[in-house]
């Protein structure tokens, strides 16, 4: 993994919007090769081997469930 970003992560049917203090990008689901959960984080790994971290406790229960539904429908879960 070449980089890790902790970010806010608005989600939509087409992908995610990633923004940090340093960058902003809109990524389609095809930009991700897998996702998973590690401790308090949901992570997404991009094709470019960058990892995006989202703190689970910063999402409402509804947003977390919507994110899991979209991830399961669009991105392979890492075992």
Image (cartoon, rainbow, N blue to C red):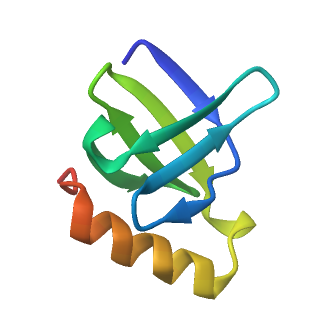
The x and y percentages for residue 11 are: 54, 62
Res 20 seen here:
yes
The x and y percentages for residue 21 are: 82, 27
Question: 36 or 71: which is nearer to us?
Answer: 71
Q: State which quarter of the image contains the C terminus.
A: bottom left
Q: Residue furthest right?
A: 21
Q: Residue at x 42, y 12 (%)?
A: 2
Res 32 seen here:
no
The x and y percentages for residue 17 are: 59, 47
Q: Residue at x 48, y 79 (%)?
A: 66
| Snapshot quadrant of residue 19 | top right
Q: Residue at x 69, y 80 (%)?
A: 60
Question: 72 or 27: which is nearer to us?
Answer: 27
| Snapshot quadrant of residue 74 | bottom left
- Relative to 60, say whether 74 is above or below: above
Q: State which quarter of the image contains the N terminus.
A: top left
Question: 70 or 58: which is nearer to us?
Answer: 70
């Amino acid at each position: 993994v070449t980089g890790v970003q902790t970010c806010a992560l608005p989600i939509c049917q087409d992908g995610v919007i990633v923004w940090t203090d340093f960058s902003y990008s809109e990524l389609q689901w095809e930009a991700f090769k897998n996702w998973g959960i590690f401790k308090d984080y949901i992570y997404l790994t991009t094709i470019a081997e960058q990892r995006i971290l989202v703190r689970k406790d910063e999402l409402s229960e509804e947003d977390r469930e919507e994110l899991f539904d979209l991830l399961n429908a669009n991105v392979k879960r890492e075992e």
